[in-house]
Amino acid sequence: MAAVPGAPERRRIVAMGGGGFSVAPGDPALDRFVLDVAEVQRPRICLLATASGDPEAQIARFHRAYRDLECDPVHLPLFRLGANPVDLRRLLLGQHVIYVGGGSMLNLLAVWRAHSVDAILREAWERGIVLCGISAGSMCWFGAGVTSSFGRPRVVEGLGLVEASNSVHWSSEPGRRTCFREAIHAGTIGPGYGVDDGTGLMFAGTALVEAVSARDGAGAWWVEEAGGQASEWELTATRLSAPASTTPLSIAELRGARERRLRPNRLGGRAAGARD
Amino acid sequence: MLTRLPTSRAGAAGSPRRQIVAFGGGGFSMEPGNPLMDDYVLGLAPREHPRVCFLPTASGDADHYVVRFYRRFGAGCCEASHVSLFRRDEGVVDFHEHLLTRDIVYVGGGSVVSLLGTWRAHGLDATLRKAWEAGVILCGLSAGSLCWFRYGVSAFHGAPQAVRGLGLLPWSNCVHFDGEGSRGDAYRGLLREGMCPGYAAEDGAALHFVGERLSRVVASRPAARAYRMRGVEGRVRRRALGATYLGAPLAATG
């Protein structure tokens, strides 16, 4: 298998609030960022488009986005294996990056569990394979997320690799934000991260080490119950370089930035005060 | 169109008639231009324009599949609808109530493992059982056939394997049956190992159950067959079932 068993801090997750290659006009800088996190010359990256039922359009967009980057992209369609049986465990554990597309978080987890893919992904994480994704593909790694699989937003349990909660499309879908805040206030779910489209959070082990953004004005927030209400603290996000650049982000540079950015509380963000 | 059969929702005792039509393979998505199998199911419904709801879950709610369903069932012959569990912005919203008021629920093919996982997450397994008990006719092909049984033989995931279905029918089921081919071999192996008895249907054959009992085998192709299969003391007994070819002149059907 490609990845060596990793120390806990080698376990990496990049959780993105939305955007990326799936939605026009896309965030090429985020697409490239998840490759850089793998820290290998030519990473193997696999798309799991399970959350939206493996639609051809999303799979095509993935290949269009990654075919010209220095990587080997494949996709694993759990709905379309009929003519092409594969060893799921072998394929997934042979990757450097596993990218989970958006869609229904509820369906995503149900289908993974039915195929026992949830256990394989935990193993991949423990081995140091980078797990990443947008929207449902972000929330799935956390203790809980906000799904709209039932129509209106509702909290649902995730895989819990990172104990905190996560909500996505923070500024673009206010209904989700309201649901997330109410659930945290009520104690139904633990505190967690609200993340905008175009923004990603990188975790090493279960600790947030970096927030990155591919869009001006897009950010991420830590939300927890404080003073009798759900309060939000904005996290400092590194603006990723423009997509025109062909130079991959320097990992050493990123690491340096990470170390420089002291974490005032355990979250790595400056307190911006409670909103609303 | 087939002559309407003398069936209705009410069974002999006045309780709803529970019906499942499990295709070995066939219908609009596998036999374009051959309406026989779908027409047979429509003919079981108690009204001229049956309410037919499509569940394309096993395909991940593939758009092209939904389009083909409406092309077949939407054009005047039925009141057609579909439920999408992956794209909640389309299709019917309150699907539990909706399914219970249909005449026919038609389940498409794809991955039976993904199908069952998704249904369970939405509580659709319980709703479909209720619908069946209320007299809604359940039908489908491939994954949409396997799902109704206690066990299905799925070849979707590499080597054929047994998948536990909803269990409305206390039998095992093998679709796209190919006799001595890999599916047939796998099914016989599973029966020898103690899997419950059941049925194997070739493409073009459908098993029509009333209650838990097989009532009739129908075929949309003259040569399509279905078999009763059972493991007995480490051996497999296979019995060919008489099938009614739906394309024969009416006087000859029977």
Image: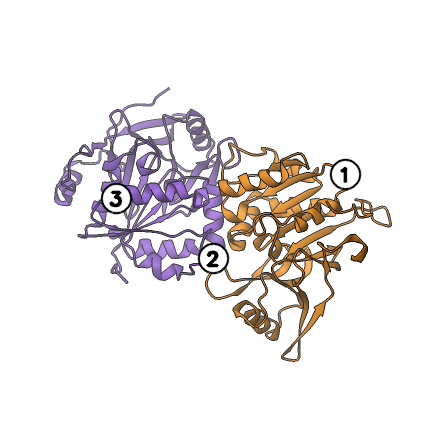
Distance (Cα) linking label 3 and label 1: 56 Å
Which of the image's four quarters has the N terminus of chain B? Answer: top right
Query: Of tags 2 and 3, which is closer to the observer?
Result: 2
Q: Is residue B233 above or below residue B117?
A: below
Q: Residues within 10 Å of mark 2 (few under 14, many from 20)?
A: some
Q: CA distance from mark 2 to mark 3?
A: 30 Å
Relative horizontal placement of residue A149, taking residue A93 as reference (left or right)? right
Marking on residue A82: 2
Determine whether the residue tagged by mark 1 lies in a helix, strand or loop: loop
| Residue corresponding to mark 3 | A34
Chain letter tied to orange: B
Residue A44 at what x, y percent from top left?
Answer: 26, 53
- Name the residue at 56% across, 48% down: B29
Q: Tell me which chain the residue with mark 1 is part of.
A: B
Marked residue nearer the N-terminal end (2 or 3): 3
Tag count: 3
The three-letter amino acid code for the residue at tag 1 is Arg
Left or right side of B174 for A100:
left
Q: Position of residue A191 (x, y in %)?
A: 38, 35
Residue A99, percent from left and from top: 33, 46
Q: Chain of mark 2?
A: A
Residue B252 falls left or right of residue B41 = right
The residue beneath circle 1 is: B47
